[in-house]
Image (spheres, helix red, strand yellow):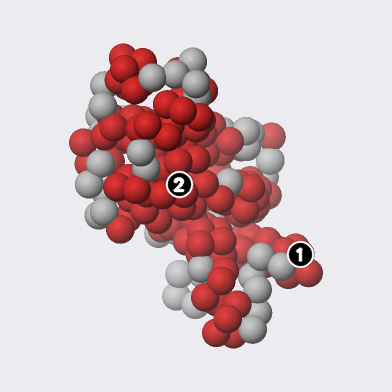
Amino acid sequence: MRADILKVATQEFADKGFSGARMDDIAHRTQTTKKMIYYYFGDKEALYRTVLETSIKALRAEEQLVHVDDLDPVSALRRVAELTFDYHEQHPDFIRLMAGENILQAEHLRTSGARGDLAAPALALLNRIVERGLDEGVFRHGVDAVDLHFTITSFSFFRVSNQYTFDWIFQHNPVAPEHRERMRKMLGDLVVGYVTNPSDA
């Protein structure tokens, strides 16, 4: 029941935002009662925060599928970029949830006690790749894991979140199938080029 509520609530909050989502609708779609939802999650804000945390943790879990020690550093970094690109494309609810929470200036995530769990796995993975790259002499010094994460996520997120306005303005749909593989490779090339170029280039 808890998992079902969480799944439906994710869709509701993604579609309607925190203010627009209704607990009655979530209860109806899960064939339960608001009382039962409150039993599992406390209140609407706690349910929304759990949805946000769970959505981010799901991405973190996917990232951990990259086995850094089985790949050379360049291939590992490219794999993280490709995985992030794919995940954002395949999970539009995640895009809408994060966009909505940013409009609210992370009001609800700021009350989360799980910040470390939401950030640490991604940064640990990228730091491990950077360390390997430095040890093997293929990465330049001064590469920051947060910068890498920001770049990879920005490209992947914007491609999906802004597809409609970008398409209308430039007459170029970034999520169109004919552009997919080129843009996926472009992201990998961008981050690999950044970490392998000399710092004074």
Q: Nearer the viewer, residue 181 or 172?
A: 172
Residue 144 seen by the camera: no
Relative to 115, 30 lies left or right: right
The residue depicted at 34 percent of the width and 22 percent of the height is: 34
Amino acid bearing label 1: Pro
Q: Residues within 10 Å of mark 1 (few under 14, many from 20)?
A: few
Q: Quadrant of residue 174?
A: bottom right
Q: CA distance from mark 1 to mark 2?
A: 24 Å
Amino acid bearing label 2: Ala
Spot occupied by residue 64 in the image (x, y as percentages of width and height) = 56, 33
Q: Which callout, 1 or 2, points at the residue further toward the start of the chain? A: 2
Spot occupied by residue 200 in the image (x, y as percentages of width and height) = 45, 75
Label 2 secondary element: helix
The residue depicted at 52 percent of the width and 46 percent of the height is: 93
The residue depicted at 37 percent of the width and 42 percent of the height is: 21
- Residue under circle 2? 14
The residue depicted at 45 percent of the width and 69 percent of the height is: 199
Q: Residues within 10 Å of mark 2 (few under 14, many from 20)?
A: many
Extreme-right residue of the structure = 178
Q: Nearer the viewer, residue 187 or 17?
A: 17
Label 1 secondary element: helix
- Residue under circle 1? 177
